[in-house]
């Protein structure tokens, strides 16, 4: 992944972390019994960030025929690495929201 694309994905994560994550999933507990709102919010955040990053990468790689299976797997791995590196920050943000 080139530095420009990595920077763009990092800025997407920053933007998402500025919004309320818990608010986006709190409605679920009204209809479905969940054991941990924190874990629900963390799962939501990870899934949302990954999907947004992958979608962004797909849009930036034109034509898509240039995306080999090996390259696709490598990009997916890089996205996971970015999210894993930022995981403590994401978790801290969720905890702050829950403790308001």
Image (spheres, rainbow, N blue to C red):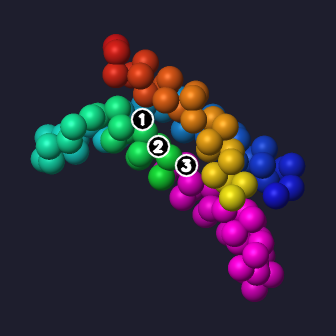
Are the residues tagged 3 and 2 within 8 Å (C-beta)? yes
Q: Decide which of 95, 62 is in the foreground and name it.
A: 95
Q: Is residue 71 above or below residue 89?
A: below
In the image, 73 versus 27, the foreground residue is 73
Q: Residue at x 41, y 46 (%)?
A: 44
The relative height of residue 43 versus residue 75 in the rendered view (above or below) is: above
- For residue 7, what is the image quadrant? top right
Magenta stretch contains residue 89: no
Label the magenta part by its dominant secondary structure.
helix
State the mark number for residue 21: 1
Verify CB contact (< 8 Å) between mark 2 and mark 1.
yes
Q: Which residue is mark 3?
A: 49
The earlier-in-sequence mark between 1 and 3 is 1
Q: Give percent across and percent down for residue 66.
A: 80, 81
Q: In the rendered structure, which segment of residues is drawn in magenta?
A: 48-76
Q: Which residue is mark 2?
A: 45
């Amino acid at each position: 992944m080139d530095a420009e694309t990595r920077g763009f994905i990092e800025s997407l994560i920053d933007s998402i972390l500025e919004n309320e994550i818990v608010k986006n999933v709190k409605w679920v507990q009204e209809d479905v019994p969940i054991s941990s709102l924190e874990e629900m919010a963390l799962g939501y955040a990870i899934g949302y960030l990954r999907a947004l990053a992958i979608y962004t990468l797909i849009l930036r790689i034109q034509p898509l025929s240039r995306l080999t299976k090996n390259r696709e797997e490598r990009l997916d791995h890089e996205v996971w690495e970015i999210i894993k590196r930022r995981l403590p920050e994401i978790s801290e943000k969720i905890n702050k929201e829950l403790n308001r």
